[in-house]
C-alpha cells in the first residue's frame, strides 16, 4: 500500500481584482461611513452589496439609494469549530457568531459577524447596528461587526 | 430530447482517506467498475466527462491528471466544476452530448480526495469584495439558512435527527458508503455536539475520498448492451444569484429546486411525486436540507416535512424511499456526490441494488445541490 507524500507550500499571495463601478462607489462610501444599495428600476429590489445587474430582470442597475447602518437580524448562528479566515490564512478563534442582517433601505441581507455569542440577545428579529472601525480602508471590514441594540 | 440511457454504474469504496490509491488510480477504480457493469471496453467509449472541484485538492487540471485514469488520452475530455452540482451537471452534459448525436457512449467520472487538500481554503476563495472576509464555509452558511427554516417551519431537532438516523442506517446496507453507523439512535444524534447552532455534528455530511462513474449511451447501443436501461426522462438545471443574502429564506423557498422539479415532473409526466416515483436519491448535505427538499420537490406541502419523516414515508419500507444509499449524509466526495446520486438511481432501475434495492423500482429521481442554491433534477425510467 502506498504512503502519502507531504508537499508543503508557504504562499504569500495577494490578488488584484477590477471592482467595477458599482463596487468601487460602494467601497468608497464605506470609507465615509456611508452604505448605499442599487435599486432595480424594473422590480424595485434594492441590492446590497450592490452589483451591476438584477439577476431576475436582466437589467443594468444604476439607481443608488441610501441604506441605514441599523436593521434587523434575520438569521444567526454561533460557530464552534475553527474556520479558515481567508484574510490571514489562519483559523478563526471560536466560538464566533455570524448573522444575516437586513439593513433599513435594503431588500437583500448581508452576511456578517455579530458582536456577541450565545442565545439570549441573539434572536431572529433583533435590532442590530453596525460597529464601524475608526480607521477605514474602503472594504467590508470597515464594518467590524453588528451589535444587538434591542 | 432523443432517447438516452444509463447502461452501467460503478463506485469505489468511499472513506475518510484512500491513501492506498492516487487520484488517477481512484478514478480508474470507478471507471473500470462502470465499464465492466456496462460490458464495455475502454476503446468503445467516445468521450469522457470529469467532475471534480480542483481547488479542494489544490491540484490544477484534474482532467489532465485524472483523465488518464478514465482512459481519456486521445479522446474528448471535459471537466465540470459547479460545487455540489458538479456530478449531476456532468451527467446532464453527457445526456446532452449523446442526445445531440455528438457521441454514442460517454463515460462520466466524478471524484474528490478531500483528505489530500484543503477544502476550506477552496471554499474561502469566494467573492473577494464581500463574501471572502466573512466566509464561514458550508457549515456556517447552512446554519444561518437552517436558523431561518426552523423559525419559519417549526421543524424540530428530533425530526432532523430522524433524517440523520435514516441516512446512516440505510448506509449500513451499502458496501460503498463511507460512514457505517448501523446502530445509530435519535438520542445519539441529539447528544452529538452542536458545531454551529442549531446544527450538530451528526446533522452534517462527512468529507470523503471516493469516485463514482456511469456510462451514458444512445438508444440503439443502450438496447443492445443493457437488459434494463435507465432512460433519461428529464434533466433540468437551475442557477441562482451570487450572494447568500440574495436568497430570501433559502431553505424555505429554494426556488431553483422548485422550478427544476416542476419542469422535470412535467417532462416526465409526474403528477404526484410520492405516488409516481419509486425511489429518490437527493443531495442532502445536512439533515434539515432533506426536510426542506421534501417540500421543494413536492413530496409534501410546505410545513409538513417533519410529519413526512415521522410517518416513515421516505423510509426504505415507505411509499417513497429517499436515499437508500445513505445519501450525502453518509458519503460525500463532493465531485463524485452528484454522480453517486444518479448512479444509485440508475442502479435501482437496473435491479442491481443488492441489500439496498427497492423492489420493482421503475421510476427514480436524482437531484444535485451546489454552492448556495443551484439545483439539478433528473428523472430516470426503466420503460423507454
Image (cartoon, rainbow, N blue to C red):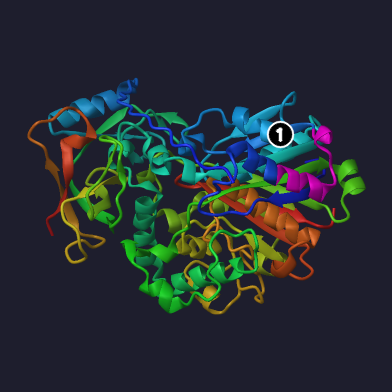
Q: Position of residue A150 (x, y in %)?
A: 13, 60
Magenta stretch, main secondary structure class = helix
Picture residue at 64% right of the left edge, 52% below the top: B340
Residue A4 seen in this snapshot: yes
Q: Which residues are magenta?
A: B30-45
Q: Is residue B99 visible?
A: no
**In the image as oriented, which residue stretches furthest toward the right?**
B224
Determine if the magenta segment contains residue B44: yes
Count of residue discs: 1
Helix, strand, or loop for circle 1?
Answer: strand
Q: Residue at x 45, y 70 (%)?
A: B160
Quadrant location of residue B35? top right
Q: Is residue B70 left or right of residue B302?
A: right
Is B197 on the left or on the right of B263, as rendered?
left
Residue at 66% x, 64% y: name it.
B273
User: Residue B250: percent from the left, percent from the top?
Assistant: 42, 53
Would you identify the image quadrant in which residue B131 lies?
Answer: top left
The percent position of residue A149, horizontal first and vertical second, equals 12, 56
- Callout 1: residue from which chain? B
Q: Dot 1 surroundings within 10 Å: few (below 14), some, or many (20 or more)?
A: many
Q: Is residue B229 magenta?
A: no
Where is mark 1, residue-wise? B48
- Position of residue B69 relative to residue B190, above or below, is above
Q: Residue at x 73, y 39 (%)?
A: B107
Q: Nearer the viewer, residue B172 or B137?
A: B172
Q: Is A148 situated above or below A64?
A: below
Amino acid at each position: 500500500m502506498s504512503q502519502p507524500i507531504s508537499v508543503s507550500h508557504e504562499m504569500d499571495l495577494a490578488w488584484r481584482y477590477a471592482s467595477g463601478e458599482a463596487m468601487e462607489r460602494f467601497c468608497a462610501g464605506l470609507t465615509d461611513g456611508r452604505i448605499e444599495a442599487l435599486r432595480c428600476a424594473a422590480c424595485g429590489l434594492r441590492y446590497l452589496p450592490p452589483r451591476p445587474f438584477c439577476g431576475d430582470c436582466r437589467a443594468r442597475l444604476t439607481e443608488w439609494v441610501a441604506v441605514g447602518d441599523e436593521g434587523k437580524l434575520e438569521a444567526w448562528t454561533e460557530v464552534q469549530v475553527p474556520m479558515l479566515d481567508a484574510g490571514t490564512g489562519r483559523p478563526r478563534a471560536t466560538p464566533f457568531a455570524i448573522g444575516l442582517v437586513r439593513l433599513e433601505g435594503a431588500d437583500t441581507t448581508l452576511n456578517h459577524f455579530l458582536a456577541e455569542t450565545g442565545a439570549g440577545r441573539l434572536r431572529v428579529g433583533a435590532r442590530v447596528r453596525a460597529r464601524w472601525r475608526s480607521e477605514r480602508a474602503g472594504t467590508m471590514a470597515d464594518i467590524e461587526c453588528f451589535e444587538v441594540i434591542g | 430530447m432523443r432517447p438516452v440511457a444509463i447502461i452501467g454504474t460503478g463506485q469505489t469504496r468511499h472513506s475518510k482517506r484512500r491513501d492506498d490509491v492516487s487520484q488517477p488510480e481512484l478514478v480508474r477504480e470507478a471507471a473500470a467498475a462502470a465499464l465492466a457493469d456496462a460490458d464495455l471496453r475502454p476503446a468503445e467509449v467516445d468521450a469522457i466527462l470529469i467532475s471534480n472541484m480542483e481547488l479542494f485538492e489544490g491540484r490544477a487540471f484534474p482532467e489532465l491528471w485524472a483523465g488518464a485514469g478514465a482512459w481519456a488520452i486521445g479522446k474528448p475530455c471535459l471537466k465540470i466544476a459547479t460545487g455540489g452540482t458538479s456530478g449531476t451537471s456532468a451527467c446532464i452534459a453527457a445526456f446532452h452530448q449523446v442526445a445531440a448525436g455528438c457521441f454514442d457512449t460517454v463515460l462520466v467520472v466524478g471524484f474528490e480526495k478531500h483528505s489530500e487538500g484543503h477544502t476550506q481554503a477552496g471554499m474561502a476563495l469566494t467573492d473577494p469584495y464581500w463574501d471572502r472576509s466573512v466566509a464561514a464555509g458550508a457549515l456556517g452558511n447552512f446554519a444561518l439558512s437552517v436558523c431561518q427554516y426552523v423559525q419559519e417551519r417549526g421543524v424540530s431537532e428530533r425530526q432532523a435527527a430522524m433524517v440523520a438516523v435514516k441516512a446512516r442506517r440505510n448506509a449500513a446496507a451499502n458496501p460503498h458508503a463511507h460512514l457505517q453507523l448501523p446502530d445509530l439512535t435519535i438520542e445519539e444524534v441529539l447528544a452529538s455536539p452542536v458545531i454551529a447552532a442549531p446544527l450538530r455534528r451528526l446533522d452534517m455530511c462527512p468529507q470523503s475520498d471516493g469516485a463514482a462513474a456511469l456510462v451514458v449511451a444512445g438508444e440503439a447501443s443502450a438496447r443492445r448492451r443493457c437488459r434494463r436501461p435507465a432512460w433519461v426522462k428529464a434533466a433540468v438545471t437551475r442557477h441562482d444569484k451570487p450572494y447568500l443574502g440574495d436568497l430570501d429564506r433559502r431553505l424555505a423557498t429554494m426556488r431553483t429546486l422548485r422550478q427544476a422539479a416542476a419542469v422535470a415532473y412535467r417532462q416526465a409526466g409526474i403528477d404526484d411525486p410520492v405516488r409516481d416515483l419509486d425511489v429518490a436519491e437527493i443531495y442532502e448535505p445536512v439533515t434539515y436540507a432533506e426536510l426542506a427538499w421534501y417540500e421543494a420537490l413536492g413530496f409534501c406541502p410546505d410545513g409538513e416535512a417533519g410529519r413526512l419523516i415521522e410517518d416513515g414515508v421516505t423510509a426504505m419500507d415507505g411509499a417513497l424511499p429517499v436515499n437508500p444509499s445513505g445519501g450525502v449524509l453518509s458519503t460525500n466526495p463532493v465531485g463524485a456526490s452528484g454522480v453517486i446520486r444518479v448512479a444509485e438511481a440508475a442502479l435501482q432501475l437496473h435491479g442491481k441494488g443488492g441489500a439496498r434495492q427497492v423492489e420493482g423500482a421503475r421510476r427514480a429521481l436524482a437531484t444535485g445541490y451546489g454552492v448556495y442554491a443551484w439545483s439539478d433534477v433528473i428523472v430516470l425510467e426503466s420503460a423507454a
